[in-house]
Image: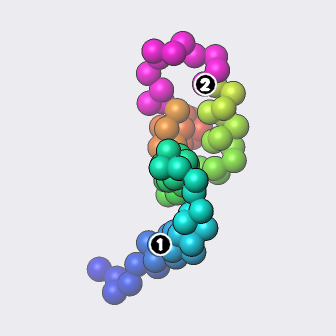
């Protein structure tokens, strides 16, 4: 087992530097939305998916789906599987 975990430490550093900016979220819902987007971007990076390519795909695919449609296939780790195929 390695003595350090540089990948995780780099991810935490990004979160810590953004934390000061997030103090200025106007509402709880705005802060929650920022946290969701941040989490999805880090999931993209962890899965080896380019975040901008994933966002373009999701934002063009979502309007074409019915409201009650399951969207689990649009999550970054599932997108990585379909992009590899």
The quadrant of the rendering that contains the C terminus is top right
The foreground one among 80 and 10 is 10
Q: Secondary structure at mark 1?
A: helix
Q: Position of residue 61 (x, y in %)?
A: 63, 25
Q: Specify whether 27 is left or right of 8.
A: right
The picture places residue 76, in percent across and down from the top left corner, at 52, 43
> In the orientation shown, which residue stands out farthest toward the left?
1
Question: What is the crowding at mark 1: few (fewer than 14 residues within 10 Å), some, or many (at least 20)?
Answer: few
Residue 81 seen in this snapshot: no
Magenta part of the protein: which range? 62-73
| Residue sitting at x 53%, y 50% | 27
Q: Is residue 45 magenta?
A: no
Q: Is residue 62 above or below residue 28?
A: above
Please state the horizontal and vertical placement of residue 17, each as a whole percent of the image.
57, 75
Q: Nearer the viewer, residue 14 or 23?
A: 23
Q: What colour scheme does the image use?
A: rainbow
Kindly identify which numbered label has been placed on residue 2.
Answer: none
Answer above or below: position of 18 versus 2: above
x 59%, y 38%: residue: 83
Residue denoted by label 2:
62
Quadrant for the N terminus in the image:
bottom left
Mark 1 lies on residue: 12
Between the residue at mark 1 and the residue at mark 2, the CA separation in whole angstroms equals 30 Å
| Quarter holding residue 60 | top right
Furthest residue toward front: 26
Q: Is residue 84 visible?
A: yes
Decide whether residue 67 is among the magenta residues. yes
């Amino acid at each position: 087992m390695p003595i350090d975990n540089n990948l995780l430490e780099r991810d935490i550093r990004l979160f810590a530097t953004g934390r000061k900016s997030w103090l200025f979220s106007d509402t709880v819902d705005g802060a929650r939305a920022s946290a969701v987007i941040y989490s999805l971007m880090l999931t993209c990076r962890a899965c080896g998916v380019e975040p901008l390519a994933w966002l373009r795909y999701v934002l063009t695919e979502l309007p074409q789906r019915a409201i009650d449609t399951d969207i689990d296939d649009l999550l970054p780790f599932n997108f990585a599987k379909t992009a590899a195929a």
